[in-house]
Amino acid sequence: MDPKFLGQASPLPASPEAAELDYVPNPRNTPYLVRFTSPEFTSLCPVTGQPDFAHLVIDYVPATTIVESKSLKLFLGAFRNHAAFHEDCTVGIGERLFREMNPVWLRIGGYWYPRGGIPIDVFWQSGEQPAGVWIPDQGVPGYRGRG
């Protein structure tokens, strides 16, 4: 499981489907939580083609592998030219990571900025939170405008 992208010049993939995610062996044999935060996630509205913006928070408890962060960054960046609804982007990211990495548990929060005056927040998790692992709140406040 040698990472393909680490230390290499790596252009953004053409699409999320074309993006390859690297997984490396979990270095610890104890339950713990990993959190990735992507506060500037972008995709495109499938109706208007206009950009949509979100703050994503991905939490997972690893099993035998962890996702390599550069490959995750490239995967998320591939959504910049991808047209999909907020729900499809958020849940699709969570399902793909869960399917490929096979962690003990995974959740994703997609905190989308307003479209048409309405912010949309999308949440998905793979099942019940595992016992014995500290899983903090995602810490993203609800949208309150500029003040």
Image (tube, rainbow, N blue to C red):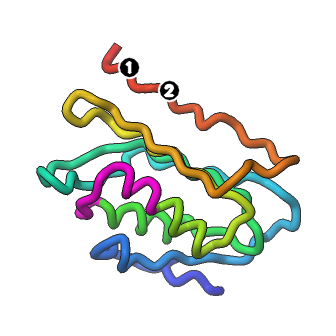
User: Which residue position is annotated with label 1?
Assistant: 144
Q: Are marks 1 and 2 in contact (CB under 8 Å)?
A: yes
Residue at position x 82%, y 47% in the image: 133
Query: Quick one: 92 or 55, which is closer to the camera?
Result: 92
User: Which residue position is annotated with label 2?
Assistant: 141
Q: Amino acid at mark 1?
A: Arg
Q: Amino acid at mark 2?
A: Pro
Q: Where does residue 88 sit, x and y in percent of width and height?
A: 37, 57
Indicate left or right for 146 with 107 as reference: left
Q: Main secondary structure of the magenta part?
A: helix
The local crowd at label 1, few if under 14, some if 14 to 19, many if 20 or more residues have their Cα within 10 Å, is few
Question: The residue tagged with tag 2: helix, strand or loop?
Answer: loop
Q: Quadrant of the N terminus?
A: bottom right
Question: The residue tagged with tag 1: helix, strand or loop?
Answer: loop
- What separation in Å lies between label 1 and label 2 (alpha carbons)? 8 Å
The local crowd at label 2, few if under 14, some if 14 to 19, many if 20 or more residues have their Cα within 10 Å, is few
Part of the protein shown in magenta: 80-92
Q: Where does residue 82 sit, x and y in percent of width and height?
A: 26, 63
Q: Where does residue 114 sit, x and y in percent of width and height?
A: 28, 33
Q: Is residue 70 visible?
A: no
